[in-house]
Amino acid sequence: MNKTVLISGASIAGPALAYWLARHGFRPTVVELAPALRRGGQAVDFRGETHRTVLERMGLLPELRRIQTGGTPMRFVDERGRTLLHLPAEFAGGELEVLRGDLARVLYEHSLPHTDYVFGDTITGLTETPTGVRVDFRHGATRVFDLVIGADGLHSNVRRLAFGPEEDHVTHLGYYAATWQLPGDLGPAKGSVGHNVPGRLASVGADHRDPGRAGAFFVFAAPELPYDRHDPEQQKRLIEDAFTGVGWEVPRLLGTLRHAPELYFDSISRADVATWSAGRVCLVGDAACGATIGGMGTGTAIVAAYVLAGELARAGGDHRTAFRRYESRLRKYATGCQSGGDRTGRFLAPGTAAGLRFRNSLLSRPLFLNGMLRLGEKVSTVALPDYPVTAGHAGR
């Protein structure tokens, strides 16, 4: 019953869900708009017992520890490069930090033996019937699946098709963020260095394994801006306009933006979805409860994939029961993690000079810093059932 499952999105939540569904005897298919697995991206982290438990049950911990970054220490400096605040690697890197592209590759490889991946295509229509969902694709032929799962991020296509327009489900949090690759001679030897003026942060970080590469990370405060998410030239102009007149290394960093081969640009936003399922369609990861930065979205996605697959197995494929149990078990946990994203923009780029001084002073106190680290581990904890896997799917 309900064995064929289409998952939209091949970043983190999608391959993690495919892995667990296959272990429980389902037949997952993953469709991804990109022509191939996305290799880039910032570092992502895991922290606390809940994240560690799921990674252990997936058998991924040894491999992820071999490719971990070791964390990223952060320095904030004035216009002349003098240090104002230093944050240790564990502040941003948690217990285990890996590059997003590396994590996506590992999840893809572990799920691939029992998953059908379709790259370079996307869903254009969903029609639910009494026995399944008829799915139309941009390029492929129409197919019917028992269930459809949206694991396609904060700007979820599945959520738009099944739940309504994005503006009904995504809340702008007052900031935008951008990242792009730099030549290595523009980066620090290790970690990241950033410079603030009110409402703006410009930072540069070393590539953890390639000394010839570095990355820029810019954040700026702004109301919701009208722009084309698929037009990088328009996005580059918005970044340049926001940082005009800022000193330190900003003019040199902006000079690399015009010819940057890849740009990530997005609002710092939060997904607020009243219910995570509609009939035979369900959401997981950022599509359901994402926050662009600082909301522990990667760890939540891994946990949610484990629980959703487990509840579908426990309910014998009864999607109504499984979806209800999945959301009941995880909503409070997910929204607690997600709430951290509400503060990210204000932390990275406080809106006033007084706010900048207050942040630097407060986080220079070891007692306060350690308290924040402990709070992060506490928030990211939830009781997890041990779902038995189907014989023959107990591992790779």
Image (cartoon, rainbow, N blue to C red):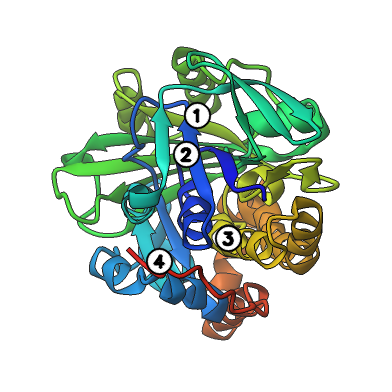
**Residue 43 rendering spot, x and y as whole percentages:** 39, 54
Q: Residue furthest bottom?
A: 367
Q: How many marks?
A: 4
Q: Observer-nearest residue: 103 or 312?
A: 312
Instruction: Residue under label 4, please give it.
Output: 392
Q: Nearer the viewer, mark 1 or mark 3?
A: 3
Is the residue under label 3 in contact with that under label 1 (CB below 8 Å)?
A: no
Mark found first going from the N terminus, 4 or 2: 2
Q: Residue at x 38, y 43 (%)?
A: 41
Instruction: Residue under label 1, please give it.
Output: 243
* Secondary structure state at the residue bearing disc 2: strand
Q: Residue at x 44, y 48 (%)?
A: 195
21 vs 114, left or right, is: right
Q: Nearer the viewer, mark 4 or mark 2?
A: 4
Mark found first going from the N terminus, 1 or 4: 1
381 vs 100, left or right, is: right
Q: CA distance from mark 4 to mark 2?
A: 47 Å
Vertical arrangement, residue 141 with respect to residue 256, above or below:
above
92 vs 214, left or right, is: right
**Residue 116 rendering spot, x and y as whole percentages:** 41, 39
Kind of residue at disc 2: Phe
Vertical arrangement, residue 285 with respect to residue 34, above or below:
below
Instruction: Residue under label 3, please give it.
Output: 296
Instruction: Judge the density around disc 2: few (<14), some (14-19), many (≥20) Cα neighbours within 10 Å.
Output: many
Is the residue under label 2 in contact with that under label 1 (CB below 8 Å)?
A: yes
Instruction: Residue under label 2, please give it.
Output: 218
Mark found first going from the N terminus, 1 or 3: 1
